[in-house]
Image (cartoon, rainbow, N blue to C red):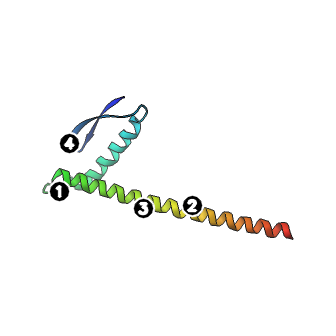
Amino acid sequence: MPEIKIKIDTENYSIQCEEGEENELRKAEEIVNKKMLIFKNETNIPRATKLLMVSLLLASENNENITLISDQKNKIVEVERLLNELEQKIEKS
């Protein structure tokens, strides 16, 4: 298993991952660090709380994206249904 080193905020970590997952972990590291910048000037918030807040923000964004994707899929299904109805009407004419 490959082992990569990542840095979240000011802490370094060594993480084992499956072969080929290295790039995804690097992307995730970048995303987490961008969110950590939100709390850059919040010196009174413990680091663990900042990490918790970042994880909640990311989970919330993920839920929003899932909802958007679901809505888009529903619209596609409706358009397909309407196209099928139109095709049937054309065939009957």
Which structural element holds mark 1? loop
Q: First in sequence, mark 4 or 1: give its number.
A: 4
Q: Residue 77: give x, y in percent of width and height.
A: 62, 63
On-image quarter of the N terminus: top left
Q: Is residue 82 left or right of residue 3?
A: right
Q: CA distance from mark 2 to mark 4?
A: 41 Å
Residue under numbered circle 1: 42
Q: CA distance from mark 1 to mark 2?
A: 40 Å
Which structural element holds mark 2? helix
Q: CA distance from mark 4 to mark 1?
A: 14 Å
Q: CA distance from mark 3 to mark 1?
A: 26 Å
The residue that appears at 65% across and 65% down in the rendered structure is 79
Q: Residue 90: give x, y in percent of width and height.
A: 82, 68
Quarter where residue 3 is shown: top left
The residue that appears at 12% across and 57% down in the rendered structure is 44
- 40 or 90: which is nearer to us? 90
Residue under numbered circle 4: 10
The residue that appears at 45% across and 58% down in the rendered structure is 65
Within 10 Å of disc 4 (Cα), the crowding (few <14, some 14-19, many 20+) is: few
Q: Is residue 65 left or right of residue 10?
A: right
Q: Nearer the viewer, mark 1 or mark 2?
A: 2
Q: First in sequence, mark 3 or 1: give its number.
A: 1
Q: Residue 43: give x, y in percent of width and height.
A: 14, 54
Q: Which mark is residue 64?
A: 3
Amino acid at the residue labelled 2? Lys
- 18 or 54: which is nearer to us? 18
- 17 or 65: which is nearer to us? 17
Amino acid at the residue labelled 3? Glu
- 17 or 58: which is nearer to us? 17
Q: Nearer the viewer, mark 2 or mark 4?
A: 2
Residue under numbered circle 2: 73
